[in-house]
Amino acid sequence: MVAEDIDEVSFFACKIRSASGSADAKDKLWNTVAKHPLTHTCRQLREDFDAIHRHKAMVTGVAHYCLEVENYDIDQLGDYAELLEQVPPVLSYVRSCVTTGKPLVRFHLNNHVMTSVDKVGQDIDSPDRLRTPFMKLRALLRQGSISHMCFDTAQFTWWIARAAVSTHMVKQNMSAIEKKAAISHPREKEARDALNTICNDLPPYSDEGNSDAQYAIALFRLHTREHDNLVRKAKKDKLRPKLRAELTEEISDEVEFMLRRQLKMAAKKTEVARRKTVKYDLREELRQELKKELRKEIRADVEAQIKARWAAEKEARRLEEKEKFRDELRRELKAELLAEIRADVRAEVEAELREQLGMKR
């Protein structure tokens, strides 16, 4: 049942060369697969589940496969292509992922990223050194073979849509192991600036996007796209506290209106709010995104608060009605008691008079 829910398989590029000691290509490829968290619980579960996971990943197939590369170690793309070509069943599954819209390669940046960026700058000076790994993998995934790779068919734009850069930023509450796999903001910016410098120092080219220079530009564009996402996220995090109070009140009104409509209660009388014309800019766009996120976060709390308020109001009305009813009952009981006492006194007086007059009943 756990295996049926697996829809993605990741290959760790850094393990490809260390797996070269195995004779079987399938074993080599399997040794690079990111193992399922279930196998990290105990030795027995690892022994029981590994075979099931391997069958799912290597035989049955999953919806998406991705190569996880540490920093910009481009040589690992070529190693991956050579290994993948030796396992045709898995290769066919990976090829089917080309048009899914998800990245086929993810470059995971950490604080050692500058070593790989410096190597990119060195590879630019050697013809075909930088672009060859890209082209090997691209040729293989386009139903071709890396042994008959044509250098005039590759386009760096193919990678812009099928690769991505991932930056796991360092946070104060991280453990030492987590920080080792993360990257600081200054180091991320330093890597981006270094890639920009490499691209700016490139000589003019006229090969319609099939040069080492173009692949360096592709890396810079991928990194810039992730950098822009980080900036966007930072602005959202900064804007979040300011909008929370405002949106809590706004969402509270929306939730209360919905609950009243569901319970067929009368609409709450509210003043007509003044509409403000806000210029559509990044702040407003982020505000709309945060509104959606915060609605999910605080909807349950707001709904509970509204129901609690309604319950308190209902209890207050109940106590008020009970007190009114108590007063009414008190008056009714007083009248009844007076009537009963009057009847009893009358009977006693009549009995005394009859006794005095010697009258019989």
Image (tube, rainbow, N blue to C red):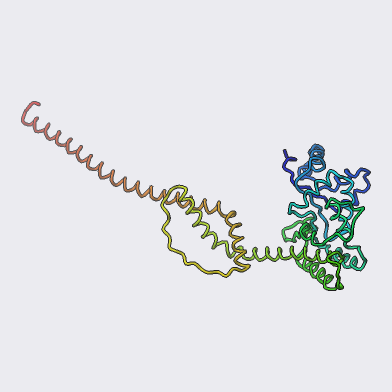
Task: Name the residue nearer the viewer: 175 or 222.
Answer: 222
Residue displayed at 62% across by 64% down: 286
Task: Name the residue nearer the viewer: 144 or 252.
Answer: 144
Return the x and y of residue 317 as percentages of the image width and height: 38, 50
Return the x and y of residue 277 as percentages of the image width and height: 53, 69
Q: Is residue 80 above or below residue 340?
A: below
Is residue 149 shown left or right of residue 270? right
* The residue positioned farthest toward the top in the image shown: 360
For the image shown, how many numbered marks are present on the structure?
0
Q: Quadrant of residue 198?
A: bottom right
Return the x and y of residue 21 as percentages of the image width and height: 94, 47
Q: Quadrant of residue 3?
A: top right
Is residue 301 shown left or right of residue 118? left
Return the x and y of residue 100 as percentages of the image width and height: 74, 51
Quarter in which the C terminus is drawn? top left
Residue displayed at 90% across by 65% down: 123
Quarter in which the N terminus is drawn? top right
